[in-house]
Amino acid sequence: DEEREGYLIGFSQAMTTDNWRKEMNRSMRIETSLHPELDLEVLDAAGNIQKQIEDINLLIDKKVDVLIVSPIQSAPITPIIEKAMSEGISTIVIDRKIEGSNYTAYVGANNVEVGGNAAKYILSHASHKKGNIIEIKGLAGSSPAYERSLGFRNVINKQTNLKIIGTVQGDWEKHSVEVGLKKILDSTSNVNYIFTHNDRMAQGALEVARKKGLDDNIIFVGVDGLYGPSGGIQLVKDGILSATILYPTGGSEAIRLAKNLLQNEVVEKNNILKTVVIDSVNVDIMQNQFNKLNQQQTDIEEQQAIIREQITSYNTQNSLIQLMAFL
Ligand code: FRU
């Protein structure tokens, strides 16, 4: 766009109903605001594949300078990203992957490692490396669900006395686990561990287990480790989850990558974020770290609100002065 002053980054977000994605958007906005030449437009697909394809088409038509996409599922979103690429738009894929390698860069944690870490946590806490496990999966067709399961099973399946006795196909949301888990717990109460692919589903699983009076016997392990009132860090602190595997959103990293691309820098194709097990041993340290980070982010947001106000009042004063000069 010739009339554009700086650069426009278009972001197609899969949905924004949950706090993890709200945090991703927030960190993108904050990072964008640190670079005056950058502008960010976020379109929310609300979990609807068709809408996400339309959103990306809109951003292509707008000729955004960089496109960022967090796909709902891999396969159905692949062709539209290939279209963006063929029209010369640099495209960053974040969190969930697409199929093939026709994109500019990916940013996200290694989800095979995330699943592996969950399994290793269970292994190190199982007495005599023994026990029955239920695995609760994220949305089928979204890459983190596939990869977390793969990493988890790679480790567990090498153990003769640790067994996955049941699998529930969830969809990342809390209520998606209820029917499937209830069915399993109706048929057996001999469950030692529940690994859920995220912390929201862990809360759903806990409620089902509680109704059966089994919650005290079961060790829950989740993923995300989000900071905040009902986030995974607090759940570990409250002893509701035994552990959660940190899954950073990558929001600020994606914007920094976009900025590097716009400055014609060479960027890595795979930008892998660090993950870590959060349990009772390190939860206070983690919470402190996130407290500080959150305070910094809030400070930035407040300062920017003040600057915006000053600009508005400057603009009004300026128009008044011009008006007076005219009169
Ligand atoms: C948020 C979320 C997270 C999960 C991620 C996987 O919408 O469900 O809880 O880790 O997506 O893509």
Image: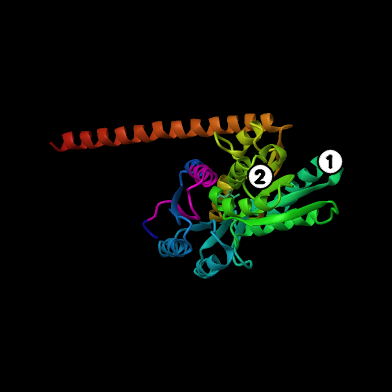
> Which residue is more in the foreground, 76 or 63?
76
Three-letter amino acid code of the residue under disc 2: Gly
Per the image, label 2 sits on a secondary structure element best described as: strand
The coloring applied to the image is rainbow
Residue displayed at 18% across by 37% down: 323
State the CA–CA distance, disc 1 to disc 2: 20 Å
> To which residue does mark 2 refer?
222
**Is residue 119 rendered to the left or right of residue 321?**
right
Per the image, label 1 sits on a secondary structure element best described as: helix
> To which residue does mark 1 refer?
127
x then y, percent, for residue 250: 59, 47
Question: Residue 165, located in which quarter of the rendered image?
Answer: bottom right
* Front of the two marks 1 and 2: 1
Residue 73 in sight: yes
x then y, percent, for residue 74: 58, 64
Q: Is residue 17 magenta?
A: yes
Question: Magenta segment, which residues?
Answer: 4-29
Residue displayed at 69% across by 36% down: 216
x then y, percent, for residue 122: 77, 44
Q: Earlier in the sequence, mark 1 or mark 2?
A: 1
> Which residue is more in the foreground, 262 or 77?
77
Three-letter amino acid code of the residue under disc 1: Ser
At label 1, counting other C-alpha atoms closer than 10 Å, the crowd grade (few under 14, some 14-19, many 20 or more) is few
